[in-house]
Image: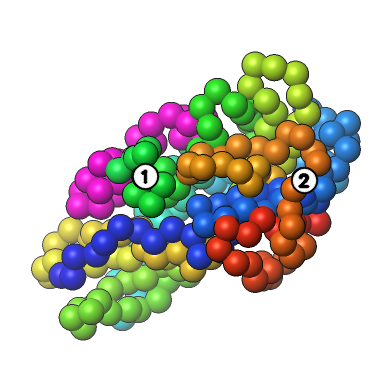
């Protein structure tokens, strides 16, 4: 089996402004709505995300059928693992608040887990694996309420590794919308969105062996509603409500994000 390297992080960048945001490869900001509009008891009211499902129920697992040499049971198991990986990376409270991402690490293949934990919070941003999950900078952010809005889908497909051996690929695309406020001090409630489009790979080293999994390359990813000046992989919401984007303005809920250059700070219309 081909030994894979580290999971590739973001091909897209962060967004800000009417939307603000930032990912591992850049940032995007936009003008936020008046903070008085975002109420603590209904933080998603008036947002397109209000129609999203709550939490893990928003990650839709389609009916499983056989794919290539993988049985329907294998495909179902793979998609359930993919769902759990997304939940651990984007919904786990300990991870979101900047703690150790134990839930995510536990689901990784042992080979990939070793790399993930070895470089977690590495001082070199190019090596830091914290960006594999969503974590707000410790002590900066509180989640408002118990709900995170989610819209996600999984899609299985047959694939092959570099040696021509069969693999099962689970493509996924998802949006996660968080309502947050400053931790331990007065401040507005704002919304932050993270978008991810990537895949997981599954295979067996031998017939009837364990179905292994790998968090694969990212096709596109960004976060909106966060500051553009972060120098590490932690997310820092833009509580200033001013926005600082100088790149293209895009629709965070659209089919495609606006093309951006590495490190560019763009804008979104709303979260």
Q: Please, what secondary structure does the residue beneath circle 1 have?
A: loop
The residue labelled by disc 2 is: 243
- Judging from the image, the colouring scheme is rainbow
Residue placed furthest toward the left: 206
The residue lying at 60 percent from left, 67 percent from top is 261
Could you tell which of marks 1 and 2 lies nearer the N-terminus? 1
Residue 249 in the image: above or below residue 122? below
Q: Pick the residue in front: 260 or 235.
A: 260
The residue lying at 70 percent from left, 28 percent from top is 181
Q: Is residue 213 left or right of residue 38?
A: left
Q: Is residue 168 left or right of residue 249?
A: left
Could you give the CA–CA distance between mark 1 and mark 2, rounded to whole angstroms?
27 Å
Q: Which residues are magenta?
A: 93-118
The residue labelled by disc 1 is: 124
The part of the image, by quadrant, that contains residue 14 is bottom right
Residue 65 in the image: above or below residue 107? below
The residue lying at 40 percent from left, 76 percent from top is 157
Mark 1 or mark 2, whichever is nearer to me: 1
The part of the image, by quadrant, that contains residue 130 is top left
Q: Pick the residue in front: 80 or 213.
A: 213
Q: Pick the residue in front: 69 or 92.
A: 92
């Amino acid at each position: 089996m081909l030994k894979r390297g580290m999971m590739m992080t973001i091909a897209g960048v962060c967004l800000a402004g009417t939307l603000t945001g930032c990912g591992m490869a850049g940032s995007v900001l936009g003008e936020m709505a008046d903070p008085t509009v975002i109420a603590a008891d209904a933080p998603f009211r008036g947002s397109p995300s209000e129609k999203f499902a709550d939490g893990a129920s928003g990650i839709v697992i389609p009916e499983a059928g056989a794919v290539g040499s993988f049985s329907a049971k294998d495909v179902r198991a793979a998609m359930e693992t993919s769902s759990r990986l997304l939940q651990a990376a984007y919904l786990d409270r300990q991870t979101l608040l900047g703690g150790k991402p134990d839930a995510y690490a536990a689901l990784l293949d042992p080979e990939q887990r070793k790399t993930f934990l070895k470089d977690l919070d590495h001082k070199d941003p190019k090596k830091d694996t914290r960006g594999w999950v969503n974590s707000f900078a410790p002590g900066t952010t509180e989640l408002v309420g118990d709900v995170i809005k989610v819209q996600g889908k999984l899609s299985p497909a047959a694939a092959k590794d570099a040696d021509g051996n069969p693999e099962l690929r689970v493509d996924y695309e998802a949006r996660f919308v968080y309502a947050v406020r400053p931790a331990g001090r007065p401040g507005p409630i704002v919304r932050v969105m993270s978008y991810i489009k990537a895949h997981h790979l599954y295979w067996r080293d031998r017939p009837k062996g364990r179905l292994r999994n790998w968090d694969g390359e990212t096709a596109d990813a960004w976060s909106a509603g966060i500051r553009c000046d972060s120098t590490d992989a932690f997310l820092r919401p833009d509580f200033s409500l001013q926005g600082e984007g100088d790149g293209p303005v895009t629709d965070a809920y659209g089919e495609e994000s606006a093309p951006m250059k590495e490190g560019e700070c763009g804008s979104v219309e709303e979260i």
